[in-house]
Image (tube, rainbow, N blue to C red):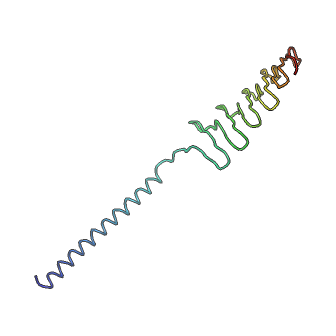
Amino acid sequence: MSEPTVFESRLNKLEQANRRLKLTVGAVLLVFAAASCADAVMPQQVADRIDAKEFRVIDEIGNVRAVMSNIGVRYLDEKGTTRTSMSDGIYYWAENGVTLALMAGDGIAVADEIGSIRVRITPNGISYRENGEVVWESPRR
């Protein structure tokens, strides 16, 4: 082969490789652009929520059902009313907000539907009340 023919052959191969490289780079850029557009168009899923100061559990319709923070843990009903809380003690509330039971540093108390303490258990003993008056109690220590 003559020198111009070898040169032309090499030049043709180089130009063909350059075209392939351009097509490959163009295709890769097109894939990246499509992927970023697809991510922007796809609906975002609701992630489990983790904040710096608290954790929240959210039900399927978006209501907060439990909260854990540096104050304690609260469980809420479907209306958003706190029903149980654990902080300086354990508390249980009725739907209307009346405390029905609690366990704190001085003992355990159980109340009726209007919030009057009916049973109290302390280190000193057990007492049962009706209308605010002690009806029965264990011997004191």
Residue 121 locus on image (x, y percent): 81, 23
As drawn, the residue found furthest toward the front would be 141
Q: In the figure, 10 relative to 89: above or below?
A: below
Residue 100 locus on image (x, y percent): 76, 25
Residue 137 image-quadrant placement: top right
Residue 133 vs residue 102: left or right?
right
Q: Residue at x 86, y 14 (%)?
A: 136
Q: In the figure, 42 relative to 59: above or below?
A: below
- Residue nearer the viewer, 4 or 133: 133
Q: Residue at x 63, y 48 (%)?
A: 51
Residue 80 image-quadrant placement: top right
Residue 85 vs residue 33: left or right?
right
Q: In the figure, 93 relative to 72: above or below?
A: above
- Tell me the quadrant of the picture where the N terminus can be found: bottom left
- Residue nearer the viewer, 60 or 90: 90
Residue 40 locus on image (x, y percent): 48, 54
Residue 68 vs residue 35: left or right?
right
- Residue nearer the viewer, 42 or 72: 72
Residue 75 locus on image (x, y percent): 67, 34
Residue 26 image-quadrant placement: bottom left
Q: Residue at x 64, y 35 (%)?
A: 65
- Residue nearer the viewer, 6 or 44: 6
- Tell me the quadrant of the picture where the C terminus can be found: top right
Q: Residue at x 82, y 25 (%)?
A: 122
Total number of numbered labels? 0
As drawn, the residue found furthest toward the left would be 1
Residue 126 vs residue 60: left or right?
right
As drawn, the residue found furthest toward the top would be 135
As drawn, the residue found furthest toward the bottom would be 3
